[in-house]
Amino acid sequence: MAIYYIDRKTGETREEIVAGDQFLQWLYRTGSGSFFLETLIKRKFFSALYGKYQDTGQSRKKIKGFVQSLAIDLSEAKIEDIGKYSTFNEFFTRELKPSRRPLCNQPEALISPADGRVFAWENIDIDLMVQVKGLAYTLADLLQDQALALAYSGGTCLVIRLCPADYHRFHFPDSGVPGPPQQIKGSYYSVNPLALHKIIRLYCRNKRELTVFRSDHFGDMLLLEVGATCVGSIIQTYSANQHVAKGSEKGYFKFGGSTVIVLFKKDRVKLDEDILDHTVSGFETKILMGERLGVKLK
């Protein structure tokens, strides 16, 4: 199953380079793989153990092959020389040169909180949230809070899927005051489209962290980071209840593909039409942290 997305800069349809594609095909498309997935791979101890290995000196041997197979642009990184990383996770969570992720300077613009591939929906039905075509989940199930879900009925939802090749730090999409992160326990399925087409209510079943963010231009919004297979940790680096600037770092994912979900209340933001149009057509749009995704609704 090939995965295609729209490159926002060029408008071209591109095929995604999938890390571990054959392994994922086996896990999510065969009976033996499914058994292995349910008995081992989705469980916390497997991802925790694998994550710990990525923090060892032995893991640094993987960096060169990882860079080559996924065509990672090292010129973006603050540290370009892979020999200077002591572990694989140190490379995976690498910081980028600020000049390579300029922030949209429009005062009332919403910026992307992460690099990735985005789906976007306006006027959401909280009882029929879209995972992929034919599969849905409820917002209350995702948030584990019925009252909070009701507050976002008719609002806007962004789902940003990070691939292993992407920059894995996530940021605040506006200035404002973030509350403390709330951990929601769960499993560790992949967030690759192969898994999204196979596992019902996947986002509601995986480990995730929820932050209520009182933004300066869009009111209260919800920021969720969803873990995935081999994501050893979701690390929050911000200080709760202190004002943050637009684009400042919120945290990072250790090894593995991951997802950031952003939710807005009704009539708070107008998303850019190209992203909405691509979603209707069934394509994710490739975006970079700091890019404009929409503007404050007047």
Image (cartoon, rainbow, N blue to C red):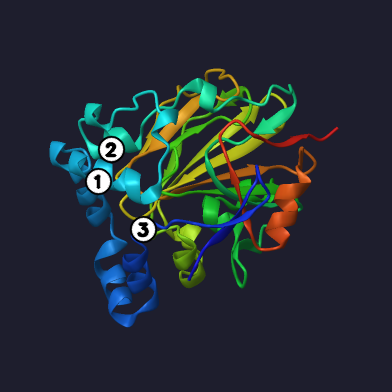
Mark identifier at residue 187 = 3
Q: Identify the residue at horizontal 34%, vertical 55% (top origin).
A: 229
Mark identifier at residue 13 = none
Disc 3 and disc 2 in contact, CB within 8 angstroms: no
Could you say whether the residue bearing mark 1 is in a helix, strand or loop?
Answer: helix
Residue 132 left/right relative to 217: left
Could you say whether the residue bearing mark 3 is in a helix, strand or loop?
Answer: loop
Mark 3 or mark 2: which is in front? 2
Residue 289 place in picture, x, y as percent:
56, 34
Residue 15 place in picture, x, y as percent:
53, 59
Q: Nearer the viewer, residue 219 or 121?
A: 121
Which residue, given by chain and number where applicable, does mark 2 sit on?
A: 89
Could you say whether the residue bearing mark 2 is in a helix, strand or loop?
Answer: helix
Mark 2 or mark 1: which is in front? 2
Mark 1 or mark 3: which is in front? 1
- Dot 2 surroundings within 10 Å: few (below 14), some, or many (20 or more)? many
Compared with residue 59, is residue 3 higher up or lower down, i.e. above or below? below
Residue 204 place in picture, x, y as percent:
49, 58
Q: Nearer the viewer, residue 48 or 104?
A: 104
Residue type at mark 3 is Ser
Residue type at mark 1 is Gly
Residue 81 left/right relative to 171: left
What's the distance in space between the residues labelled 2 and 1, CA to CA?
8 Å
- Dot 1 surroundings within 10 Å: few (below 14), some, or many (20 or more)? many
Which residue, given by chain and number where applicable, does mark 1 sit on?
A: 51
What's the distance in space between the residues labelled 3 and 2, CA to CA?
21 Å
Disc 2 and disc 1 in contact, CB within 8 angstroms: yes
Quarter of the figure with residue 189: bottom left
- For this orientation, the residue located farthest to the left is 58
What's the distance in space between the residues labelled 1 and 3, CA to CA?
15 Å
Quarter of the figure with the C terminus: top right
- For this orientation, the residue located farthest to the bottom is 31
